[in-house]
Structure formats: C-alpha cells, structure tokens
Image: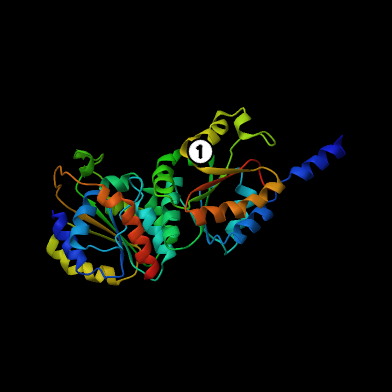
Amino acid sequence: MMKRDDCLKALARHVAEADIVLPVYSTAFDWIAIRPSPLNYLSHGAMGLASSHGLGLALGRPDKRVIVLDGDGSLLMNLGTLVTITEVAPPNFYHFVCENGTYEANGGHPIPGRQTVDFAGVARAAGIRTVHEFSDIKIFEQQIGALLAGPGPVFVCLKIVASGPQERDYSRIHGPQVRAAFREALAAD
Amino acid sequence: MQVSASRESDRTALLGGSIIREIKASKIEFVVSVPDITTSEGLLRPLAQAKNPRLIRICKEDEGVGICAGLAYSGRRSLLLIQQTGMLDSINAIRGVAVEYALPICMMVGLLEKEPGVPPRQSKRYGVRIVEPILDAMGIAYHEIEEESDVAKIKPAIDAAYSDSRPVVLLIGRRPS
C-alpha cells in the first residue's frame, strides 16, 4: 500500500505545465499543494463526474493531456464512464483512481465492496486496453513516466492507505474564482 | 373529415430534418445522448449517420452533463439529447454543474408519453406534468418544441445559453417525423 501524497508527488514529476488535471475531493487538496496551476480543474459539481468532465475536455482539447485523479467512491457512482471512455477512446485521456476503500471526504465510511471490488478488473472488462494497478511506490515511480508518455485511454488504480478525517475548506475548490482562472488559462493556452 | 385531419397533421407535424438543420445552424459540434423514444427515429438515428455533429453515446445522462461542461470550457458547443426521465435522474448534476456553475449546458429533452398537442403541464402523465415546474424551481430556461413553427426557437435558445453562460432545455413534445 502507498501513501497518496507519495503517489501524487511521483505523478507531478511527469505532469507538464500544459496538462489539465482533474483531482477530486481529498486528492484535490493534496494535489493543489503539490502542483498549483490554473489548469487544475477542481469544480465537478456532483460526485462521480470528474471523469466525464475530463472526457469532455479531452474531446474539446485533443492537443492537451487530460489527467483525472478520481476516488474509488466517486468512480463507483459513475461506473458507466469506463464504458463511455472506451467507446470514445481519446488518446489524450489518463484516468487514475486512488483506492483507499473509504468515502474519505464523507466521514471515512467504507465503500461497498471494499474487500472485493477489483477496479482494474472492472476497467479491463469495460474494454480499456491499458490498465495498471500499483501498490508499491517504487514500481509506480519507475513506470509512471512511460504510462503518461504513451497513448490513452489509460486507467491506473493506485492502492493507497486512507488518510483519516480531515478538515477541508471546500470553497478553495468550488469557488467561482477557481473556475474563472481555469477558463482563462485554458483559453490562453 | 379525413382531409381536415390530414391538413391538421401537416400543420402541426414536427420534422426531424428541420430540428437537425437548427442544431447545425447553432454550431453544435457534439451531440451527447442516451436514446429517447420520442426522438429516436426522427432525430437520433439521422444524427448517428452524420459525421457532423459528432455523436457521443453515453451510459447515463449525468455523464453527459459533465462531458458537455468539459466541452464548454474548451469552447466547443454541444447538445445533450435525452429523455425527461434521464433529465430527472440527473437533477443533481444539472443543479451543480449547469445552474450553480452557470455553464451553457443545452439539453434537448424528449417528453416520453406526452400527448401530442397537449401542453406538458396539462398532460395526464405525472412524469410529464412535473417537468416544467421543476425547471421553474431550478431557474432553468426552457422552450416547448411541439410544432414545426417552434423549431425557430432552437437556435436563439442555444445562442442565448452560450452568450449568457446558462443552461437551457428544449422540450420535444411529439415524435419528429
């Protein structure tokens, strides 16, 4: 098992300035501390939809890499997205899921299927061809660069430990200023 | 009587080709859709055979709200073509993404089982009757597309949604031919 922070730091070393990144909930707070950028797309409006927003961005901006940092509880709310991603098959789309087995932002309750669900297996069954699962940070650090350098769609499950309850200021990710900054940065890029 | 009924039918017929022409005139590049029986034959099937706009088939309607949002940020116009049952299922996504974030999510919504010629609020179908009051409560603009003369509402409605950055719903009240 890995720590989310370590995974995000390893990932950030391979994320370019021009990449769009969509992190959700707890991951969003950790990510914006590691990689502050107006091209972080933080406002998803409803739980589970980050990958769908990302798919729209990948279609709308095929010139840019789109990296979704999803949660396991979030993905469970929108499993059909994996089928849609397969159908659309955007080559610039990279979908990471931080699997900690809990609804961390909602009190740390376990997700259904915590001990049994196989997210990588679900992604493969949905038709995504490039699927990986990591639970060792050293192996993830070795392979992440090549994964992001290759064509999408890519699905990566990161097995991480839960961080426990944390106080978060959600206005930092849901505020209108965040969306305005993203819109401006994307239009200029 | 048969002649009269036929003339009435001609007058009120809704043509899929006219709607598609307006969709294209509105510079819609992507149609994002879950099939809807009202618009299945007259709209979705011909749209599926065309390259422009590009059809994106989705598994569930709220996915489409997110996809259209991403496209809107990218400066690309899209239309979410769904049934009112799917719109009702996606209320939270529409609330959060379209209304609270003030994004131009344009929805074309087939009204399943609405009686032709009957205003949605007067439908005998509960699932039809509640649609406009819900949109009113959410503060979302909508337009009834029931007859061929209503098709002219489509482009101005979509243009306004994008110029004002707000959602709009186009309610398809009968099966386009």
Which amino acid type corresponds to the residue marked 1 in the rendered image? Leu
Give the image's coloring scheme: rainbow
Considering the numbered disc 1 on the image, is that residue within a helix, a strand or a loop? helix
Closer to us: A25 or A36? A36
Is B134 located above or below residue A42 in the figure?
above
- State the count of labels: 1
User: Which quarter shows the C terminus of chain A?
Assistant: bottom left
Left or right, A83 with respect to A130, comes to: right
Is B76 located above or below residue A76 in the figure?
below
Residue in the picture at 27% in, 45% down? A73
Q: Label 1: how many residues lie within 10 Å, few (<14), some (14-19) or many (20+)?
A: some
Residue B114 seen in the figure: no
Residue in the picture at 34% in, 47% down? A48
Is B53 located above or below residue B99 in the figure?
below
Left or right, A142 with respect to A43, comes to: left
Residue A72: % across, % down: 26, 48
Residue A46: % across, % down: 35, 45
Q: Residue B131 occupies which quadrant of the picture?
A: top right
Residue B5: % across, % down: 82, 37
Left or right, A98 with respect to A65, comes to: left
Residue in the picture at 65% in, 34% down? B119
Residue B146 seen in the figure: yes
Closer to us: B56 or B168? B168
Closer to us: B36 or A166? A166
Residue where numbered disc 1 is placed: B135
